[in-house]
Image: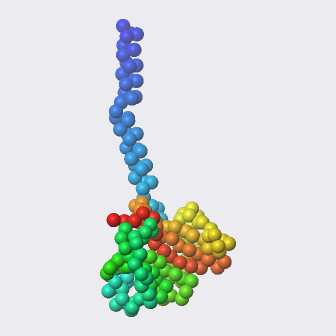
Amino acid sequence: MKIRVTIIAFSLLAEACHSPQINRTKTQSKATIKTDSSTNKEYLDWSKVKLNGTIPMISSFKEVVKQLGKPDKIDTLTEGANGSYYNKKFQYCYFKGATFEKYSDTLVFSELDFSKRTPFYLTDGRIRFDGSSRDFDFKKLFPDSFENNQLSGTSMDVYEYISLATAPNKTNDEWDFTFHTKNGKVWGISHDDPEVNK
């Protein structure tokens, strides 16, 4: 009788070790890990960044012209392309070193070119990037992005390219920072969306 009770007790113990409750805990752990890996530790929030502290990254053409004056140039119509914000026709619109994609009356920020003198800067209200920004400024703010995404350019390693997330959650788009390797000065900041939005 003792042997039979021992076998039953052992069977119940083995069954408890493989119970659905333990499997549920493993599933919950995997979900938690997935949620954690779907967030960005470092990012510059696209929805909060403004050109010169007043112009949102997606703006009305009329409002931008009110603040910046007439554009220097508007290119001919271009088909929606990989890297553009919307999957439809647009024009490039230029204002003294700042480039936007123009969709009818909507402007979407595309790039700031610091290789030329420009009065523009980008800020989210606490961080500011302008023509005097250096790679060590970026490294202080975003050390992981600097170390993990530092890529050399092909022009005899004159430039270093560093990408940065645009939101706390994972997205397709990113900021691309270009720094000159000789003096560490920022050369350009662009917004890249490898997969076009709706």
Q: Nearer the viewer, residue 85 or 158?
A: 85
Position above or below: 165 against 57: above
Q: Residue at x 50, y 76 (%)?
A: 189
The quadrant of the rendering that contains the C terminus is bottom left
**In which quadrant of the rendered view does residue 10 lie?**
top left
Position above or below: 184 against 64: above
**In which quadrant of the rendered view does residue 17 lie?**
top left
Residue 193 in picture, x, y percent from top left: 44, 67
Position above or below: 89 against 6: below
The quadrant of the rendering that contains the N terminus is top left
Q: How many marks?
A: 0
Q: Nearer the viewer, residue 82 or 27?
A: 82
Q: Nearer the viewer, residue 82 or 120?
A: 82
Q: Residue at x 41, y 45 (%)?
A: 30
Residue 4 in picture, x, y percent from top left: 37, 10
Residue 75 in picture, x, y percent from top left: 43, 82
- Color scheme of the displayed model: rainbow
Is any part of residue 43 visible from this angle?
no
Residue farthest along the bottom direction in this orientation: 69
Judged left or right of residue 117, residue 106 is left
Is any part of residue 105 visible from this angle?
yes
Position above or below: 124 against 70: above
**In which quadrant of the rendered view does residue 55 lie?**
bottom left
Q: Residue at x 68, y 72 (%)?
A: 156
Q: Residue at x 64, y 79 (%)?
A: 183
